[in-house]
Image (tube, rainbow, N blue to C red):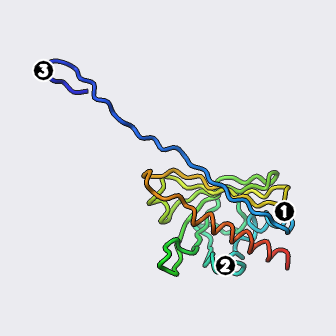
Amino acid sequence: MDYVRGKVIETPVQVLCIGPTRKVVETPIQCSTEAFYKFFKKQAKLLPSVCGAVVHTIGLADGNRSWVNTVGSRKVIEILSADSTSDTAEKFKYVVEAVDDRSRKITYKLLEGSLLQLYDSFTVTLQVTTGNTAKWTVEYVKKNPSNEDPDFYLDLFRTINATVDIYLRSN
């Protein structure tokens, strides 16, 4: 409110609230749904050897000693960079927010990395469905409405799904 010559003038304030946006990538898998889920829950350390073109490295973070994804476990991953002019990797630190073995679902929340320059929050959920589908859901809140959607990363999930599926069928 402003005071002008003894009068109260209400100044409208425009508040821009940007809510979370959700995008989903679903791909069919031919391997066992249990094997696919188990791979991401207990064997994520194999990602660089299984799909090294996308996942360059993965490591335990903040004192974690187990590769099993449990609530609160933290890891650091280096993946192919979204910068199309570069063949470099981007490093991200994430925490496992939720694990639901019954519905074969794991939720990861980004803690550090370049994406947090564009988004206030960035959460990824993997769910392996009984219909032999691997579904990645990305939920994010843009810091600025003009920031791009993270479609590049959704494409990476498609590639990871296909590569892990092939690996699990042959091993």
Q: Is residue 171 visible?
A: no
| 105 left or right, relative to 81 | right
Q: Amino acid at mark 3?
A: Arg
Q: Is residue 147 visible?
A: yes
Q: Which residue is mark 3?
A: 5
Indicate the secondary structure of the residue bearing disc 1.
helix
Q: Which residue is mark 2?
A: 48
| 42 left or right, relative to 33 | left
Residue 33, label in figure:
1
- The quarter of the picture where the N terminus appears is top left
| 66 left or right, relative to 20 | right
- Percent x, y of residue 93: 55, 65
Of 68 and 79, which appears nearest the observer? 79
Mark 2 surroundings: few (<14), some (14-19) or many (≥20) residues within 10 A: some
Identified at 44% across, 60% down, the residue is: 117
Q: Amino acid at mark 2?
A: Pro
Of 28 and 109, which appears nearest the observer? 28
Q: Hey, which quadrant is residue 42 in on the image?
A: bottom right
Residue 66, label in figure:
none
Q: CA distance from mark 2 to mark 1?
A: 21 Å
Q: Amino acid at mark 1?
A: Thr
